[in-house]
Amino acid sequence: RGGAVMYISGVLESKGHKTIVSNDQANVAAAVKTMCDNHVGAVIIVGANDKVAGILTERDILRKYAEFGDKLGNMPVTKIMSAKVSTTGPDAKIDEVLATMTRERFRHMPVMDKGKLVGIVSMGDMVKAMLEEKTQEAESLKQYITS
């Protein structure tokens, strides 16, 4: 069994497809409330026709708070979100997506399938999936050796 390739679809299967979004007309305070209410570190910003317009992360908010202070809450999310969003598909390999996230220095990636947002994966989700896979492989090897 060794060396099984893991795909993003498997990560979404175990964590679910729920994706927290915020409208591109929202202000930062509303997006922060959405993130807090849902216990997530990033929210996908969607525009017309539910198209991905950007992503807003805790890190974005923290950095912009240092710049704008109390004015930040009333600012539109479009002013501080990352508009350049790297996405992946369900059939992408976890190790390749992790490499991209590490190289480009971000921790959340929307998953798109045929132009439709179907989920989001975090670096933590993928590390967890890889650890579970390695644990299963080790257990299988142990069973094989002792049988």
Image (tube, rainbow, N blue to C red):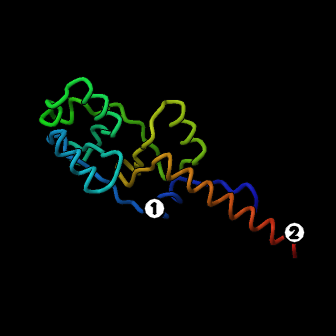
> Where's residue 30, x and y in %?
17, 46
Foreground pick, 115 / 79: 79
Dot 2: element: helix
Foreground pick, 27 / 63: 63
Assess disc 2: are there few (<14), some (14-19) or many (≥20) residues with their C-alpha within 10 Å of its C-alpha: few
In the rendered image, which residue does mark 2 sit on? 145
Dot 1: element: helix
Three-letter amino acid code at the position of disc 2: Ile
Residue at the (50%, 49%) spot, across then down: 124
Q: Is residue 13 above or below residue 68?
A: below
Q: Is residue 131 above or below residue 96?
A: below
Residue at the (28%, 33%) spot, across then down: 81
Residue at the (33%, 39%) spot, across then down: 57
Residue 19 as seen in the image, left or right of residue 96: left
- Looking at the rendered image, the quarter that the N terminus falls into is bottom right
Three-letter amino acid code at the position of disc 1: Lys
In the rendered image, which residue does mark 1 sit on? 15
Residue 125 as seen in the image, left or right of residue 3: left
User: Which quadrant of the view contains residue 6?
Assistant: bottom right
- Looking at the rendered image, the quarter that the C terminus falls into is bottom right
> If you read the primary sequence from the N terminus, does the residue marked by circle 2 or circle 1 appear first?
1
> Where's residue 32, x and y in %?
23, 45
Residue situated furthest top in the rendering:
67
Foreground pick, 2 / 126: 126
> Where's residue 108, x and y in %?
42, 43
